[in-house]
Amino acid sequence: MPIFYGKASLMDYLKSIKTIHSTLGFVPTMGALHQGHLALMQKSLAENTNTVVSIFVNPTQFNNPEDLAKYPRTLEEDVKKLTDLDPNIILYAPSVADIYDGQPVSQSFDFDGLENPMEGKFRPGHFNGVGTVVKRLFEIVEPTHAYFGEKDFQQLQIVKKMVAKNNLKVVIISCPIYREANNLAMSSRNERLSAQERDKAAVIYQILTSVKAKFPTNSAAKISEWVQKFLKKNPQFTLEYFTIADEATLTSCNRKNKNKKYRAFIAVLVNNIRLIDTISLN
Ligand code: PAF
């Protein structure tokens, strides 16, 4: 499998394999690869001439130094998973200096308010960090198509906005959430959960499916109240936020409008590990 640790050699290589008709799929990741990542890659491999995967734990999107320090780094195992999936995958695993050319700092973006609620509220600066690294990676890789999972739905909307505002020539493709056997959304952070915590975290999806069932006949406020009460019965889980929001603007739903698409978003802390999930409601 071709592996590049520096952007100059990656860019030379990509130039050498590019043809008029070729397409280049791109799956940006922070490593600790799981089945959810591999599904994005499979889609990219099926839809493009070549596929680049990046593994880079981006420091500027972590507002919590402990979260950055504890983020799993498993490059050797990741390389094995990629090789087993398809040895033609092109891996870019840069250093911080290769991406940032100096001190890692974020650019400041205006995402038309998409950045303010939920993750934006609880992780200040997070989306400037995501915007900065994704833009940088797009400039280096120049993909025709880039693949993002719907678990990070707010991130997906923000990346689409960044692409539109900067007139970038890349098609953003969203892919459904991959779940473990107990329906916990797959995430690299799940590796930090104990077996018992992982088991119990099934409650997150149970809440979301109940919310979906309640949505046609209950107000968003009433449902939020129910979620808060329900989680109080599970003291191992601390609710950071629960919101029902308009999919397009991510503004919370006060009165339902039948022309809009709504989604429920949840973030909980288990033993200081943040887990997020989302479900489409209509
Ligand atoms: O979703 C992620 O893993 C990261 O936010 C991304 C898109 C790779 C940027 O660092």
Image (spheres, rainbow, N blue to C red):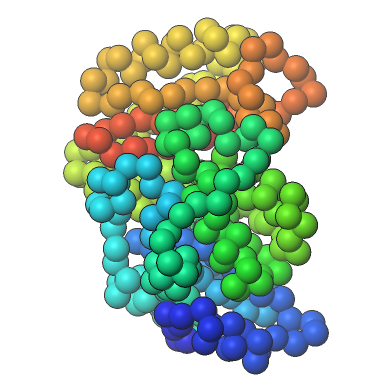
Work out whether 219 lies above or below 154. Answer: above
Work out whether 133 lies above or below 1. Answer: above
User: Given the current orientation, which residue lies at the most extreme front position?
Assistant: 102
The mark tally for this picture is 0
Q: Nearer the viewer, residue 206 or 3?
A: 3
Residue 78 position within the rendered picture, expressed as x and y whole percent measured from the top left? 36, 70
Work out whether 39 lies above or below 25. Answer: above
Going 64% across and 24% down the picture, which residue do you hit?
251
Q: Nearer the viewer, residue 143 or 35?
A: 143
Residue 235 occupies quadrant = top left
Going 38% across and 47% down the picture, which residue do you hit?
62
Residue 132 occupies quadrant = bottom right
Can you see residue 106? Answer: yes
Instruction: Decide if residue 151 is on the left or right side of residue 20.
Output: left
Quarter of the rendering occupied by the C terminus: top right
Instruction: Decide if residue 93 is on the left or right side of residue 44.
Output: left
Quarter of the rendering occupied by the N terminus: bottom left
Residue 194 position within the rendered picture, expressed as x and y whole percent measured from the top left? 19, 44
Instruction: Decide if residue 141 is on the left or right side of residue 183.
Output: right
Going 55% across and 51% down the picture, which residue do you hit?
107
Going 37% across and 76% down the picture, which residue do you hit?
79
Residue 154 position within the rendered picture, expressed as x and y whole percent measured from the top left? 57, 39
Residue 104 position within the rendered picture, expressed as x and y whole percent measured from the top left? 42, 59
Can you see residue 86? Answer: no
